[in-house]
DNA sequence: ACCTGAACACCGTTCAAGT
DNA sequence: ACCTGAACACCGTTCAAGT
């Protein structure tokens, strides 16, 4: 897997950036951003807190590596023989589900752009948009917009998911929000007032895919 | 401005949540998330650190209030007589510019959803999409997707902007990224390799608007 | 009701010392 | 080359005490 193999690391429990990142992801998944501490990480890896700094520059570096690891895993393994539209949908859903499963990734994405994994997403979307017949002059902007859309909307969704995870369940939370929206007064907020009832019932995943589809329709309609 | 006026706060320098949030925004703008500390805030407001806790529950609450304040200011003042498409563009650009000017808002958006300012955005986009002729059954999903798109993409953009702000200028940073992309090898990354050169020259604001337009085209093409 | 500021628990990071 | 763990600087939050 690694480029250099450090002459077969002597012991299986030897420290490495990979093992550190792996443990960090577990801690982040378990308790969010605040649950990741160097002390906890050191204890989990049965070592001193300073040892981690030999493999990792600092906490930001560790968070970036963890984010990159999650996104990279989500993008690989895309079967590309289902047509451009379905391939795009598959990649998009992969990213969506990955961020949904690791909500802290959403916040990280808004802090450190230009992941090492970004070219993979860009390549996947760009080549499929080209196959879809998008003309050369529009290709760069369209691909950028699609990448930003998927990462951005997935991040937004993960932010919502966080609320449900904190004890109270999904429908209850959305029900409360819907009530607040419904109370906003039909004069100043006629649309919100009318649409509030649909809030608790909607499916985030379906809505995400609908958004991607709308975007694709716009891209193909534009030429 | 406030609902209750606390019988005309005695002195002009009296503490209030508004003044605290205002000072917090200035500190966040100046140095990012890490620059906001209760000690610094207390010194800036010439008070004790504990005093702030009388008006604000904790740091998360303060960050949420600051985020809401920025977004709320961006959404108000939308002249609505320029047609639905232009009104949507205006609201979207307002949010984009606000997040661009306050990059820390992007990260916050990925942490705390359901801002108090959200209904304003929802109302603006939803009513204009309706005016655009989007049929009732698609209205909720379309509006949700557009809101998530604008907030998400604007957040993604702010993440990029952070890099340029840290000393080195925009073109230099994007030039470096473009070089890395170009080196990725035309066999595995033909699209990225080919498109890398367009990276340093693109205009984020124009690309954002192009994305919103593509989305709108998709929405209108869908019926 | 609102402010003060010392105190507590905790955290990222460093570094001399080890192997 | 890599690990140890005490030490440093700093931070969010609390709370008894003031006005």
Image (spheres, coloured by chain):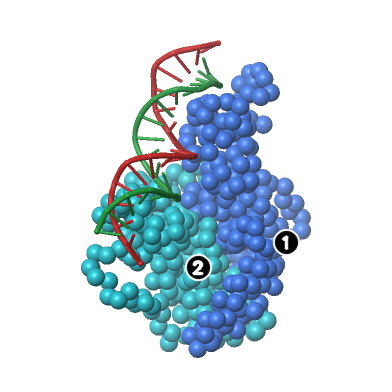
Chain colours: A cyan, B blue, C green, D red
In this view, B200 is above or below B36: below
10 Å crowding of disc 1: few (<14), some (14-19), many (20+): some
In this view, the mark in front (1 or 2): 2
Q: Position of residue A85 (x, y in %)?
A: 50, 80
- SS at mark 2? loop
10 Å crowding of disc 2: few (<14), some (14-19), many (20+): some
From where the camera sits, is residue A189 visible?
A: no
| Left or right: B219 in relation to A103 | right
Q: Which residue is mark 1?
A: B86
Judging depth in this view, the residue of B15 and A204 nearest the camera is B15
- Residue under mark 1: which chain is it in? B
Q: Residue at x 77, y 58 (%)?
A: B82
Q: Position of residue B115 (x, y in %)?
A: 54, 46
Calculate the distance from the C-alpha at mark 1 to the C-alpha at mark 2: 34 Å
Quadrant into which the C terminus of chain A falls: bottom right
- SS at mark 1? helix
In this view, A7 is above or below B90: below
Q: Position of residue A177 (x, y in %)?
A: 47, 45
Q: Which residue is mark 2?
A: A115
- Residue under mark 2: which chain is it in? A
| Left or right: A162 in relation to B173 | left
Residue farthest right in this picture: B82
Q: Residue at x 47, y 71 (%)?
A: A117
Q: Which mark is residue A111?
A: none
From where the camera sits, is residue A81 visible?
A: yes
Looking at the rendered structure, the number of numbered marks drawn on it comes to 2
Quadrant into which the N terminus of chain A falls: bottom left
Q: Position of residue C15 (x, y in %)?
A: 42, 49
Judging depth in this view, the residue of B150 and B175 nearest the camera is B175
Q: Residue at x 53, y 33 (%)?
A: B39
Q: Quadrant of residue B190?
A: bottom right
Q: Residue at x 38, y 60 (%)?
A: A54
């Amino acid at each position: 897997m690694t480029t250099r193999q450090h002459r077969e690391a002597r012991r299986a429990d030897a420290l490495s950036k990979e093992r550190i990142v792996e443990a960090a992801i577990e801690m982040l998944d378990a308790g969010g951003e605040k649950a990741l501490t160097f002390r906890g990480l050191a204890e989990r890896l049965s070592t001193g807190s300073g040892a981690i700094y030999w493999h990792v520059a600092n906490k930001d570096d560790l968070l970036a590596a963890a984010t990159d690891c999650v996104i990279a895993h989500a993008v690989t393994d895309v079967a590309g023989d289902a047509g451009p539209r379905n391939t795009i949908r598959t990649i998009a859903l992969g990213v969506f589900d990955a961020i949904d499963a690791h909500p802290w990734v959403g916040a990280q994405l808004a802090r450190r752009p230009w992941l090492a994994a970004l070219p993979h997403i860009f390549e996947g979307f760009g080549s499929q948009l080209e196959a879809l017949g998008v003309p050369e002059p529009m290709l760069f902007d369209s691909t950028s917009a699609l990448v930003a859309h998927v990462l951005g909307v997935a991040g937004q969704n993960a932010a919502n998911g966080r609320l449900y995870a904190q004890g109270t369940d999904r429908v209850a939370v959305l029900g409360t929000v819907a009530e607040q929206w419904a109370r906003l007064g039909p004069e100043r907020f006629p649309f919100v007032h009318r649409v509030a009832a649909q809030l608790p019932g909607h499916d985030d995943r379906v809505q995400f895919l609908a958004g991607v589809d709308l975007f694709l329709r716009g891209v193909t309609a534009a030429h």
